[in-house]
Image (cartoon, grey):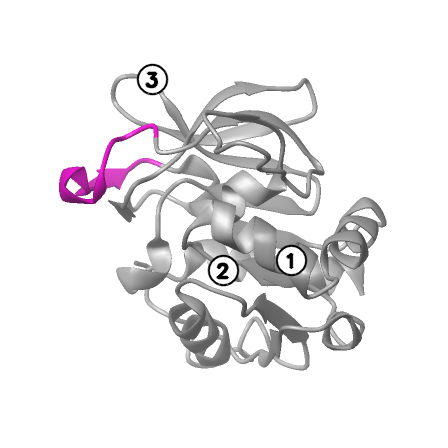
Amino acid sequence: MSAPDLGAAPVGAGLRVGVLALQGDVREHAAVLTALGAGVVLVRRASELDDVAGLVLPGGESSVMDKLTRRFALRDPLRERIAAGLPVYGTCAGLILLADRLLDGIAGQQTLGGLDATVRRNAFGAQNESFETRLAVPALGDAPVAATFIRAPEVVEVGAGVDVLARLADGRIVAVEQGPLLGTAFHPEVDGETRFHARFLEQVRAAV
């Protein structure tokens, strides 16, 4: 992780962003965003979504999150805001929610869509097959990114407008970007890695 510029304003200063707070590692994302200077709203209702200029979809259980967005009447507002250009960063389950196409979901599982990609759920196996590695992500600088994979998805196909930011050594795609949408199959928020969140906040600033 690169050293911060102590003379510069935090990248998130003056920005108000949300973390979808229905399930998953909400606190970890909120802590990173707060450390980067952003104001954080925990989004559980459509009215709270109206108050933010960007949104993080955290890791967790994608099928549960899908069901809860429908139960709390958030699915349609989320889809509308994403389609309208809301900057969104999805990690692990959040990446699944962002994808237009899903493989190996449970019966009836839906995504929010917006990201022109096909994602395979639980591509790296069960919880006890979780692993850590370091990834080259040229878009974030020369220093490698610490990446923790926990029941992680894999991006198996991307559309022409999607940039691949990172791959594993075997070529599998694990980080992508399409305009204001950013997705990682792994959890930088658990490793003290802030550069993906900073990139997300830069998208938010550009949008506002």
Q: Residue at x 64, y 72 (%)?
A: 17
Task: Find numbered disc 3 in the image and state the secondary structure of the residue it sits on.
Answer: loop
Question: Magenta segment, which residues?
Answer: 123-136
Q: Quadrant of residue 109?
A: top right
Q: Residues within 10 Å of mark 1 (few under 14, many from 20)?
A: many
Q: Nearer the viewer, residue 182 or 59?
A: 59
Q: Find out whether residue 128 is within the magenta segment.
A: yes
Residue type pointed to by label 2 = His
Residue 129 seen in the figure = yes
- Picture coordinates of residue 176, whole percent (x, y): 52, 34
Tell me if residue 189 is in the magenta stretch.
no
Give how far apart the Cα atoms at labels 3 and 1 are.
33 Å
Q: Residues within 10 Å of mark 3 (few under 14, many from 20)?
A: few
Disc 1 and disc 2 in contact, CB within 8 angstroms: no
Where residue 157 sits: x, y (%)? 54, 17
Packing grade of label 2 (10 A; few <14, some 14-19, many >=20) is many
- Residue extending farthest front: 107
The amino acid type of the residue labelled 1 equals Thr
The residue that mark 2 highlights is: 197
**Image coords of residue 159 (percent x, y):** 65, 19
Q: Secondary structure at mark 1?
A: helix
Numbered badge on residue 171: 3
Q: Quadrant of the C terminus?
A: bottom right
- Above or below, 172 against 86 in this view is above
Q: What is the spatial separation of the Cα atoms under label 2 and label 3, in whole angstroms? A: 24 Å
- Residue topped by disc 1: 69
